[in-house]
Amino acid sequence: MNVGILYSRIRKDEKLLLAELRDRGHTVEKLDIRKLSFGLTEPPAAFEDVDVVLDRCLATSRSLYATRYLDAYGIPVVNSPETAEVCADKVNNSLTLAGAGVPTPRTEVAFTSDAALEIVERFGYPCVLKPVVGSWGRLMAKIDSRSAAEAIFEHKETLGHYEHKVFYVQEFVEKPGRDVRVLAADGEPIAAMVRHSDHWLTNAAKDADTAGFELDDEAKAIVAEACEAVGGGLLGVDLMELEGEDGPGYTVHEVNHTVEFKALNGTVDLDVPGAVVDWLEATVDEERSQTEPSVGAHS
């Protein structure tokens, strides 16, 4: 197959995918989003004969618009623009998960600092303030007191971008010093790891320690439900464990659509890029079988 890699920077994740695809004899088109333009009816020449495009753009805005164009051209893209639109925005993410009955932390949104402060007072301290768009734990704040909330909200109100006028407040979940990252393909887990840290943020990008994690049946079911809710595809599902009388439960705090897996690949005893390409090959084969005319078809 001919695979297009849509990127803005080739990171270790993309290098792993490129090596795996080429080792299997697939043709790979490296498509630098910074050098492309998209018209209303015809795709750029670089996309000719591409069987599927993997969206690996770093910038959310580029990802959202590029996948929308590719879908309009009829070019299969992973992940779909519908999935990207849900996952790229934390408000959409939370609303979609809650609407599908997937357990997710209590979350409220306000548009002024006074209204946001009322949310914080209802939730109690600590609670968490997140940007509606962002990754790697950036611009997130754990709010421990009213004075801290007032200072943080005042700072946000002075920033110019409209997204800073959206106050996305979430309850603080008492997790056991770790969270769980699951890489899943159409709801089926490929591999999972826990991310440990003494800091309240446990992102691998924040240098958290990682270890492989065996999902139980409840976690697998929640991952499948979360993936289906956002539209399926190649996804990263972030779980937090909840202690209960009947054992641990889980809550999904986010689903990621341009998921990184280099830390996971270095943690688990599985060839993660190999498993991703296995799924991609099966996906392309299924797409072909649905579009090719059946034997004996005639006009």
Image: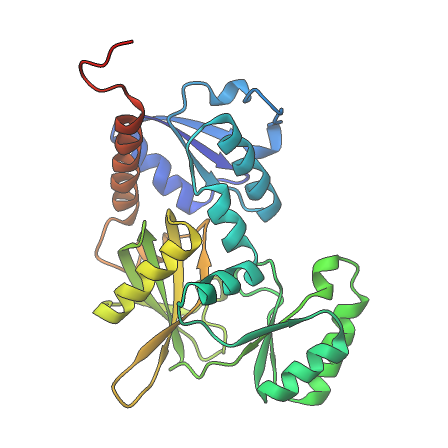
240 relative position to 90: left or right: left
Residue 21, above or below 209: above
Give the percent coordinates (x, y) of residue 287: 31, 31
Residue farthest along the top direction in this orientation:
299
Residue visible at 42% across and 63% down? 100
283 relative position to 119: left or right: left
Picture quarter with the N terminus: top left
Residue visible at 21% across and 57% down? 269
Q: Can residue 216 be seen in this view?
A: no
Give the percent coordinates (x, y) of residue 189: 27, 56
Along the viewing direction, whichever of 254 and 103 lies nearer the viewer: 103
Picture quarter with the C terminus: top left
Give the percent coordinates (x, y) of residue 67: 52, 37
Residue visible at 32% across and 54% down? 184
Residue 83, above or below 172: above
Q: Is residue 264 visible?
A: yes
231 relative position to 35: left or right: left
Along the viewing direction, whichever of 57 and 94 lies nearer the viewer: 94
Residue 186, above or below 75: below
232 relative position to 127: left or right: left
Along the viewing direction, whichever of 98 and 132 lies nearer the viewer: 98
All told, the count of numbered labels is 0
Give the percent coordinates (x, y) of residue 78: 42, 40
Tell me the quarter of the picture where residue 192 sits: bottom left
Residue farthest along the front direction in this orientation:
299
What coloring was used for the rendering? rainbow
Residue 84, above or below 281: below
